Image (cartoon, rainbow, N blue to C red):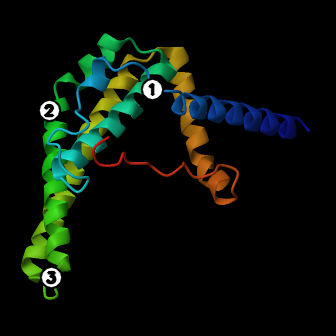
Amino acid sequence: MKEKKLITLICIGTLVLLMSVTAWAQRPAEPQGGLHSRAVLNPSGGTPSDPEQEAAEEMNRILRSLRIVQNFFGIPEEVLQGIVADTYEEMLELLRTKHALVLELHELMNDPNPPPGQVGQLIIEIRELNQEIKAISQSWGDKIEAVLDEKQLEKLEMVRRVAGIIPAFKQVGLIPPPPPRVRPADGE
């Protein structure tokens, strides 16, 4: 009987935490400043398939995630800026390079007879860039975890437990997919 109550409490706590994280993620955007002002939304005035534009959009998604984590744990702005400062430009350059290579790969794949060696080389280069991007993201996560106090670390452990069950909730339709991204029309 005690196990059943414990499981119920864990489930309720998990759902409350999940709802809190979801509410934070769906809050209206805060005024631009700090980390938000670093990635330019349309740096080259290009189209959405422009590698510069794609890199800026991906960096902005990363920055929004960092902002959610910052707000969830109550991390001061200057601490978060210190965490990403040394590798921010490197991350943005890796994203630019990756998106340029992805565009090049798509162009090659539209060719009826793409050169296999060139396709293979691009795939390898993109994979290596993704690994470098992941390493920087992981270093940011490690640095964030290092500044958390005991109470914040407990919240992190709860989030990690919830993350393990979220796929099941999505699978059965209890967590709907996010709404589709809407891109502004040209000239807006």
Q: Which residue is mark 3?
A: 111
Q: Residue 13: where, in percent of width, then height? A: 72, 31
Q: Determine crowd level at label 3: few under 14, some 14-19, many 20+ residues with C-alpha closer than 10 A.
A: few
Q: Residue 68: where, in percent of width, then height? A: 46, 28
Element marked by disc 2? helix
Residue at the farthest right position:
1
Q: On screen, 124 above or below 6?
A: below
Give the number of the disc on residue 29: 1
Q: Residue 46: where, in percent of width, then height? A: 18, 48
Element marked by disc 1? loop
Q: On screen, 168 above or below 163?
A: below
**Which part of the image, by quadrant, shows the N terminus?**
top right
Give the number of the disc on residue 89: 2
Amino acid carrying label 3: it is Asp
Dividing the picture into quarters, in which one does residue 5 lie? top right
Dividing the picture into quarters, in which one does residue 69 lie? top left
Q: Residue 169: in sight, yes or no?
A: yes
